[in-house]
Amino acid sequence: MNNLIKDIDILTGEEAQAVDYKTTVEENTGKSKKIYIESYGCQMNFSDSEIVASIMKKNGYDTTSDFQQADVVFLNTCSIREKAEQTVRNRLNHFNAVKKHKPEMTIGVLGCMAERLKDKLLEEEKIVDVVVGPDAYRDLPNLVNGAEDGRKGVNTFLSREETYADIAPVRLNSNGVTAFISIMRGCDNMCSFCVVPFTRGRERSRDPHSIVAEAQDLFNRGYREVTLLGQNVDSYKWSPEENNKARLNKKEGEVTTVVNFANLLELVAKISPLLRVRFSTSHPKDITDEVLYTMKTYDNICKYIHLPVQSGNSRVLELMNRTYDREWYLNRVKAIREILGEECGISSDMIAGFCTETEEEHQDTLTMMDLVKYDFSYMFFYSERPGTLAAKKYEDDIPLEVKKRRLAEIIEKQNQLSLERNKLDIGKEQLILIEGTSKKSKEELKGRNSANKVVIVSAEGLKLGDYVTVKITDCSPATLFGEVLEINPALA
Ligand code: SAM
Ligand code: SF4
């Protein structure tokens, strides 16, 4: 452990007071006006909605899960694929019908679609009153007030500094056991297919004191797992002198102490052995051996890495501007297996049918999957996004039916691999954290093992938040089934 981590430890108490996470209110407080929020897309958006709810609560709005009761409806949107935007537009049509009976209802579009389309969204969707990008949520109360007085408003200012570090998120739809903590915002990577750098702006890291304080407060309130979120968590970097990475311009010869992602992981892991730590997403070019060794050192850092490969072919990866090739990726997987062993879960994102991808190159994705043996993948066919590097430079030349067929092959391969990987767990003893009821039966609960796999067990004698040692008895491609051996074994 380096000195900096000790310093940060000491500072944590003071900072926790300054941030005042204890003011978080989860229930409705009976205030008059109500907001209803629907979130689309990645976990980052769900996490942002919790920040939005907090900002609105401080300004006199309660949350409601029934839009019929809402004075303000927010759709927190995603632009990553065309279909995601279409889903939001369909939803706006639905709210249009509702608004006919309740004309005073304010409708806000937040997030990536707001950022991408800006005031065009007001022109195209007459129902919308406010359009607010991911870095402008502090302005929401002001814009909603304006809308209530009949003035439509747009704020899509992208910041180099905003991390909402001082805002204690209101946990929405919480199970009281697992929570997401946003540790950074934006992305500097410029993958050619991706709209995120344009909709979420430059990468910046959040003050580690506020992250540790948020995790500590969650733990004190009974939460037992936090997931540290960012588009590229391995490039997390914060220095006490410069506050965040965006302003980290060292002069020659100047020494700046930096908290990197491995340091941050350690700080959060040290809160308690009873607090599990997960993180997402890791970019293959950035994940370091230091991170892998930190994971190995702490039992409570879960042995699971989401390491999106996107394609198994080096030429396609270059066109995608992923800045690694097939060999680099396979070497990173080798390091994971050497340091963390075969049981570490690895998952991926895949894109089928990127511009100019040949059948042989598609086969490289399938063989990559065989080599890594992913436990799980998020799989998509390429959807051209306006303004991205790929849209400007390459023709979207793979016919839709070919993209769909290649995607089906990738999905079929993943199903086989998931089953194969899950079968290896049968007969093993694993520690799971109970986080909810099984979809199929109220008599069963679901937990997750360290490798992020869902395990179903009998609910008898168990409650949410329990750690349970189970013996895995059976599996499907998506789920493990276990027999309870011990409830809340000593973990310290
Ligand atoms: N930052 C993460 C990373 O680099 O892996 C991923 C962020 S993105 C929200 C999630 C996934 O959406 C990407 O990994 C990629 O597979 C997929 N995606 C992004 N743009 C896409 C596009 N234009 N068409 C299809 N899938 C896309
Ligand atoms: Fe998009 Fe690439 Fe950034 Fe991920 S790393 S958000 S895919 S630009």
Image: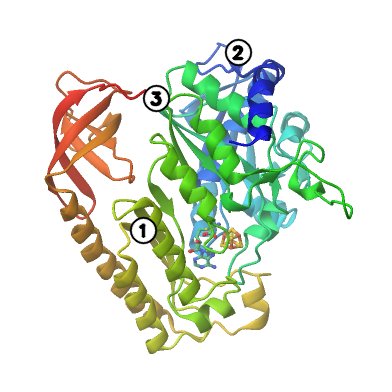
Query: Do the numbered discs 1 and 2 sit on residues whose CB atoms are within 8 Å?
Result: no
Q: On screen, 326 above or below 104?
A: below
**Gap between marks 1 and 2 measured at Cα:** 53 Å
Tell me if 136 is positioned left or right of 355 in this view: right
Residue 421 location in percent, x, y?
23, 57
Residue farthest to the top?
A: 30
Cα separation between marks 2 and 3:
36 Å
Residue depicted at 45% across the width and 68% down the height: 331
Quarter holding residue 480: top left
- For disc 1, the marked residue is 337
Q: Secondary structure at mark 3?
A: loop
Res 356 seen here? yes
Say what amino acid the circle numbered 3 marks.
Answer: Leu
Q: Which-is-in-front pick, marks 2 and 3?
A: 3
Task: Say which amino acid is labelled 1.
Answer: Arg
Q: Nearer the viewer, residue 241 or 6?
A: 6
Q: Which residue is mark 3?
A: 274
Q: Earlier in the sequence, mark 1 or mark 2?
A: 2
Give the SS element for disc 1: helix
**N-term mark: 2 or 3:** 2
Which residue is labeled 2 in the image?
A: 31
- Residue at screen point 67% across, 59% down: 197
Q: For residue 152, which numbered disc appears in the image?
A: none
Q: Which mark is nearer the camera, 1 or 3? A: 1
Binning the other alpha carbons within 10 Å of mark 2 as few (below 14), some (14 to 19) or many (20 upward) gives: few
Q: How is the image coloured?
A: rainbow
| Mark 2, secondary structure of its residue | loop
Q: Which quadrant of the figure contains the N terminus?
A: top right
Q: Which of the pair 258/231 is nearer the observer?
A: 258
x%, y% of residue 107? 63, 39
